[in-house]
Each structure stands twice: as C-alpha cells, then as structure tokens.
Image (cartoon, rainbow, N blue to C red):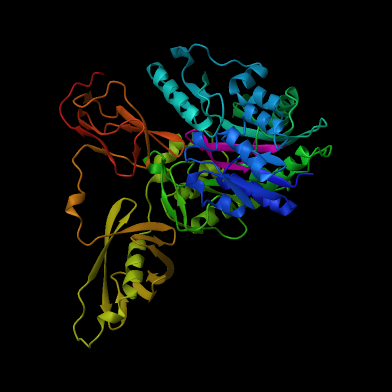
Amino acid sequence: MITSVLVANRGEIACRVFRTCGELGIRTVAVYSDADENALHTRVADEAVRLPGAAPSDTYLRGDLIVKAALSAGVDAVHPGYGFLSENAGFARAVLDAGLVWIGPPPEAIEAMASKTRAKKLMGLEPLETVTAADLPVLVKAAAGGGGRGMRVVRELDALDAELTAARAEALSAFGDGEVFVEPYVEGGRHVEVQILADAHGTVWALGTRDCSLQRRHQKVVEEAPAPGLGDLTETLYDLSVRAARAVDYVGAGTVEFLVADGKAHFLEMNTRLQVEHPVTEAVFGVDLVALQIQVAEGAALADDPPRARGHAIEARLYAEDPARSWAPQTGTLHRLAVAEGVRLDTGYTDGDPIGVHYDPMLAKAIAYAPSRAEALRKLSGALERADIHGPATNRDLLVRSLRHPEFAEARMDTGFYERHLVALTTPAPDPYAPLAAALADARGHARSRFGGWRNLPSQPQTKRYDLAGTEHEVRYRHTRAGLTADGVRVVHADARLVVLEVDGVRRKFEVTRYGDQVFVNATALTALPRFPDPTAQQAPGSLLAPMPGTVVRVAEGLATGAAVRAGEPLLWLEAMKMEHKISAPTAGTLSALHAIPGQQVEVGTLLAVVETTPVSTAPR
C-alpha cells in the first residue's frame, strides 16, 4: 500500500496529482527549482525538496537529483506527471533500482514506445530516410517527448536542413534528447487519440476517444471527449490501441494517437504517460485516472470491462501568450484567475503568482462537462468569456472565438484550423465603452475633491488615454453638479469598482479592477497611458527588440554588422518557456548593429539588433 508519493514534476500536473493523493490519504512531496521556490505546487504539497538551479536541464531533467530527493523524503513511490522525465526509461529504472514504486509503465514499455521512431517500427511503419521534392510536405519531429516541441512542417526542400537543426536544438533543450526524424505530413487530418489503462494481470481498457485537432505549433489547445463523428472507425481505433498496449506488455495509463483523414487512421505515436487532456476522459467516464494509476501500481486488478461513457466534455488550455504575435509567451504577475462554478479548473497558479520564463506558458485548463456536446460548448465558452483573468496577455479571447466558430461548433475542424482562421480569430474586437468605464471609475474617486466651492459654469472636459489592443484611445467626460457625464451615454452609476452606463436604452455593467497602469474592465485589458508621452522612449527605426524575456540560443550563421539582409530573413533565435522564437529582419537593409550574443539572457524590450533600410540586393548571402 502506497502511503507517500513524490511527483517528479511541477505546476499544474503536480497540483493535480497531489489533489488525488490528498483524497486518498497519501503524504505528498514536491520537488522545485529555484525559479519555483514559492510556486503553488510547492505550497500545496506536504513537503518539498529543492533542486538547485532554474533551467530544466539542471533541475527537473536531473533524474539523479529527483531520486535522491525521494529517498531523503522517505517516500514510497514516484509519479512522473507528464513532460520532463515522464517517458524516460532510464529514470524509471533508477526509481525502481532505488527500491521505490514507479507509478508508470515498465521501463521496457517506455523504451519501446517513448521513441517515436521505435514505436513506428513496432507498428510496421518506417520514417523517411531521405526526402525528395515528391515527399513534400513533411513533418520533422522529435523522437522523444511531446507537447509540439521539436516539430516543424517543411514545405520547401531548401528549408529542410535549417528546420532539422532547429528541431534538434528545441528537442534537446526540452527533453534532453536531440534525436529527430522525418515523416509524411498528413494535410487536413483530425488528431484523434485513445486513452488506455492496463493492469499487471492482462486487462487493457480503451477508455474512449478524444479529439485534439485545434493546435498551435503542433501543441494542443482544445480537446474533447468523445471525438465527434467517428462512426465505425471508433472500434478500429480501440483495436489498434489495445494491440499497441499488448505488444509491449503495457501497464498503467497511456495514450495512442492517430491522424484521421479520409476515413482512415494513421498511427502517430503512443505516449507512455498521463496526458494533459486526461480530465475530459475523467469527466465522461466518471473516473479518477490518477487514482487508477496508483491502484495499478499497487498491484490491483482492473474490472473486466471499463465503465460506460456518458455525456460530453471539452477542455481549453489557457496560455500566457499573444496569439496575434506568433504566440509570443508573456510574463508578469497573475493578479487574479477565477472561472464560474461548475467548470473544473486545473492550474499551477493562484492569485499573485509570478509567471516566469523558464517553463511552459500554460496557466490552466478549463474543463466543462454536460449531457451533450452543444451544452458543454456553451458552458465552457460562456465561463471563459466571463472569467476574471487579470495579468499578462492570454489566449482567452482566441479560445472563446474558437469554441464558437462554426467549424468547431459543427465538428468540422482539423489540424489546419488555426492556419486558416488565426487572423480572423485574433483581429481585435474590444468593447468600445471599456476605456470610458475605466476613466469614470478612476475619476470617481477624485470627483468630490473637485467641488470644494460652488460654481455656476460647466467644467472643462477631462481626458484620459488608454492603450486598448495596441491602439490608443482618448476618452472625454465632465464633472457636473449632477455627477459624471459623457457624450452619447448616460452614467447611471460610477465608483472605483463598478460603472453602469445606459447606451441606447440598455444598461450595461462594467466591473473595473486596476493594478498600477494595468486596468481590467470586465474581460477587456487596457493600459493607462501618461498624459504626456516620454520623448526618450523612442527607438531608432529598424530596431529589433526582444518581444519576451528569454535566452539568445543562436545567431544566423555568418551574420555580422554590415551584412545585407532580406525582409523576413531569420537573424537570431530566442528560447523562452521551452520553445524557440525566430527574430527576423523587419525590412530589407543593412545590419548596422548586432547586440545579441548566444547564451545572453534578455528582458522584454532589450535591443537585439538594428536593420537600416537601404536599397540592397535581394539575393541570398
């Protein structure tokens, strides 16, 4: 019987495992890097052990340190979570060799399936050894790990070498394994997966399907169970998944992934771990997969048949990122995160927590369950629309619009959804009355001080300026003896937290919260601008500024001051939150300054390079 568990992970998944352990009466131990010293998962665990350093390679990827932490804390078992070392057979063996229980599949099964190249060979498939123009498009893919890291779609043969290099670097950083391979890229397919659970007594459950087709950078954004519209293909997917599990004597929770196109299933991989999207399966089948993992690790036998599925569940991943700017990750303080009751929120953050640069930018997963898909969709989109998410920019608006898009609502989506619709889904549509509500809420606290004596003349208009979705808005209002007034609307009520406006006979409520210059009006984020802009804040034309905090991982080969560059030419790469971000020349010209150095840590706004616009040849260097 397991009485204590160390989770070899961080953030949301660590908190999720600890929650189940607490319900089972199991003592919990966290591990944490220096960057995570006060993270939520360290606070909710019964005990915590430090892993010195901040980078994943120094901390959460150090299996030796984690095993040492488990032994020093005196735990019975280790749960790997997902990502990091969760699919590392060597780590699993080290845990077992230390006399601890491993809450995961046998190391031999991990070895057989954790490498996507070996898994494909086991299923009778082979990666492409050489690539010709006839093979395009192809997908470069990391052999280890998941989460979309180390993946690149290549549509031009000349770009293959560069994408292989980038994929290797990203995979090595994320998983400690730089092996990549190339396979045909299936256009217009749906990403469908099957949750499996197996015990050590020969029973294998196929716990339904999930559709995970809405992806950015090959990383899932929205998932649901069951996958809609599969028809007779469902049983085929079950059979293939159970066959894959039995082929490697699998034990524990795992996921078999497919691309479905033209009524056919194309095997992708088997993930030998719990998946991020497991909550939708839990909701539909009424199970706790973590509790079942623990029971299987204790040697318990599963029932002959899995429980029956009921209803529908949809999960949306909330990221600290800006989808309109190449999904650039965001950092800062998460002041508040709250969704409506009845929607499950799995998160590794709480109000006031900092969002740093070292790890994945996922803030939380919101999961809605209902008797039908349409009801679950309405429930989740409405909850996200009304949620309090105060802090750095997030993908919340994108999620709401995605869930309400006709293609998704009618279950006609595929993995190319965002390639087709991203521009429309990220075109700003801010509430035009949000700046006025912010200004009135701010002014109301000072209104009384303006009426120290009686005056018979109307006041001059007051003005305030806000940045709203990248556009400057100036609003005007007046202080009168009757209160605050604004052109075109009736101010019904205004205080520092609530403004009620009547527009065309309809009363609208605006809840206003301010954190310094950052103002949140309902779901709209604004930045209060100074009355007089700082003239020293201007940058030279062509300046390339770091769009996020991160590390300069490399500079384009041969790039030096004085070089001619083409518009859109990649100049350097930043790594932030475990993903690489390309910094390209904004225009054709001459590189007049290069300040970026590989290994350099940069903050938002750091000057990386300057490109002076000059007539240059468009031929490659």
Q: Is residue 580 magenta?
A: no
Magenta residue span = 207-231
Secondary structure mostly seen in magenta is: strand
Q: Residue at x 20, y 56 (%)?
A: 533
Judge whether 418 appears above or below 156 on screen: below
Can you name the residue that lies furthest to the left here?
615
Foreground of the two, 251 or 436 = 251
Q: Is residue 30 left or right of residue 449?
A: right
Q: Residue at x 57, y 60 (%)?
A: 340
Can you name the residue that lies furthest to the front here?
72
Foreground of the two, 94 or 560 = 94
Q: Residue at x 19, y 21 (%)?
A: 617
Q: Is residue 151 something one can see in this rendering? A: no
Q: Is residue 229 magenta?
A: yes
Q: Is residue 24 left or right of residue 440?
A: right
Q: x%, y% of residue 19?
A: 66, 52
Q: x%, y% of residue 91?
A: 63, 30
Q: Dividing the image into 4 quarters, which one contains the N terminus?
A: top right
Foreground of the two, 13 or 315 = 13
Q: Is residue 584 left or right of residue 593?
A: right
Q: Is residue 612 something one can see in this rendering? A: yes
Foreground of the two, 597 or 364 = 597
Can you name the residue that lies furthest to the bottom here?
454
Q: x%, y% of residue 518?
A: 36, 59
Question: How many badges with numbers are in the image?
Answer: 0
Q: x%, y% of residue 506?
A: 42, 69
Report which quarter residue 250 is drawn in.
top right
Q: Is residue 178 left or right of residue 560?
A: right
Q: Dividing the image into 4 quarters, which one contains the C terminus?
A: top left
Judge whether 358 appears above or below 122 on screen: below
